[in-house]
Image (cartoon, rainbow, N blue to C red):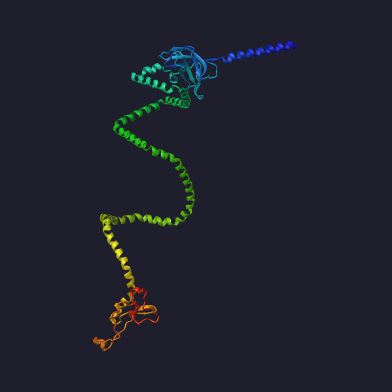
Amino acid sequence: MADAKVRLAALCALALGVVALVAVVVVGGSTHTLNLRFIDAGQLVKGDLVEVAGRSIGSVDEITLTNDNQANVKVKIKGDDFWPLRRGTVAGIRAVGLSGVANRYVEVTPGPPSGATIADGGIIETTKTRPIVDLDQVLTALDAPTRKQLQRLIKNGSTIFDGNAKDANHALEYLNPAVAQSHALLSELDRDSAAVGRLVSTSAAVATTLSGRRTDLQGAITNTARTLDAVAAERTALQDALTRGPAFLREAGRTMDNASDTFQSVKPALRELRPTAAPLAAVLRQLPGVGRDARPAVRQLRNLLPALREALLAVPSLDKAARPALTSTTSALLSALPIAAGLRPYAPDVIAGLFNGFTGTTGGYYDANGHYARIQLVTGAAALSGTLAPLSAGQLQTGLTARCPGAAVEPADDKTNPNPEDVSVCDTGQNKK
C-alpha cells in the first residue's frame, strides 16, 4: 500500500514537470518578426545576432532588396523580454572587431515607454537605422596627403602608447561618461536637424562676414597674441599673485567680517547724522550755482597761472641769491643782540628825553609804578624873553657817559631807580646822588 502511494506521488510530480516544460516552450518560446530598413546592409548575413545592450534577443532571418533600392533586414526576436518595441527604437549595424568582414551584428536601442508600440512584422524606417561605416570607406574618402599624415599619426601613436597601454585603457575608462554624453548630444542634434541646419546657415553667414573683415580679424588675432606674450612674460608675477591669492582672500574675508561689526557700530552715528542730512542737501543744491558763479574767478586764476609759474620758476634762483644775505643778516643780528640787550634798559630815558626834554626835563622820573612823565609849565619874564637864569657852578656836570638806566634824576625813595640790571654797561659812580 505504501509503495502504491509512492508511485502515485512520483507520477504526479512527473506530470507537473511535463506541464511546466510545455508551458515554458509554448509561452517562453514565442517569436516576433521585425523589418529593419537600411541604406546599406553593411555585409550582414543570415544568422547574425540581434542584441540589446550586449544581450542576444534574436537573429537575422532574411536580407532582401526593396523597390527603392534599400536593404530590408528581417529579424526574428525570441521571447517577450523586450517585446513589444516602441516607436523611437533605433537599430544599427555594428562590427565585433576588425579581424574579419563578416563579423557583424544588429544593435537595437529600445524606444521610450511613452512611444506607440510597433506591431509584429512592423517596419523601422531608415530615419531610425544606422548603417555601418567600414574603415576602408573612411580611408578611401581621404586624399593622399591626409592618408600620409594619418599614417604618421598612427606611427607616432604606437610610439607614445608603447608600454603605456594599460594607463591609456584606464584613461579611456574615465572617458566613457564623456563619450556617452557626446552620443546623447549627437542624438539630440539628429532629432533636431532643422535647428542644426539653421545653425550651419548662420555659421556660414558669420564666416562670410568674418572673411570680409579679414584685416580686422588678423589685427585682433595679432593683438591677442601680443597680449598673451605679455602675460607669459609676467608669469612669475602672475604665479606670485596666484600664490598670494588664498592668503589675500582669507584676509579679505576677515576684513569683511570686521566690516560687519563696524557697520553695526556706525549705525548710531548715522542716526545722529540724520538731522544734518537736510541742511547738507540744501548746501549740495547750492553747489551748482556756486560753481557757475565761481567760473569767472577760476578763469581769472587760470590767466594768473602763467605769471605764477614764472614766479615760482624764479624762486630757486632767488633762494640761491638770498640765502647768503639771510645767512649774513642772521649772523649780524646774533652779533647785535648784546648791544640791543644793553640799550634796552635805557629805552625809558630815551623816550622821556624825546617827549619831555623840550619842556626842560632832561630825564625820566620813576616811582613805585616805574617811569612817569612830568610836565612843567615855565612862565615869567625870563620865559617870555627867551632867557633863563644862569646855571650855578654846581649844577652843570660833564663827562657823564656811563650812567645807569634812570640815573639822570634823583633816586626814588622806593629805590626803583637807578636800575643797573647789567652793571657791565654803566658806571654806578656817575648816578645822580
Quadrant location of the C terminus? bottom left
Residue found 46% across the figure and 44% down from its top: 251
Q: Nearer the viewer, residue 243 or 171?
A: 243
Residue found 40% across the figure and 56% down from its top: 280
Left of 240 or right of it: where is 315? left
Left of 39 or right of it: where is 335? left
Q: Give how far across and how far down residue 427 sits, in percent.
A: 33, 77
Q: Is residue 9 visible?
A: yes
Q: Is residue 76 visible?
A: no
Q: Residue furthest left?
A: 385
Q: How many marks?
A: 0
Q: Residue furthest right?
A: 1
Vertical relation: 8 (above or below) 195: above
Quadrant location of the N terminus? top right
Q: Quadrant of residue 16?
A: top right
Q: Nearer the viewer, residue 41 or 315?
A: 315
Q: Quadrant of residue 155?
A: top left
Q: Give how far across and how far down residue 11 sits, in percent.
A: 68, 11
Q: Nearer the viewer, residue 187 or 149?
A: 149
Q: Give how far across and how far down residue 108 sits, in percent.
A: 49, 19
Vertical relation: 124 (above or below) 231: above
Q: Give how far across and how far down residue 63 sits, in percent.
A: 45, 12
Vertical relation: 3 (above or below) 274: above
Q: Nearer the viewer, residue 121 or 93?
A: 93
Q: Quadrant of residue 388?
A: bottom left
Vertical relation: 384 (above or below) 59: below
Residue found 30% across the figure and 30% down from its top: 211
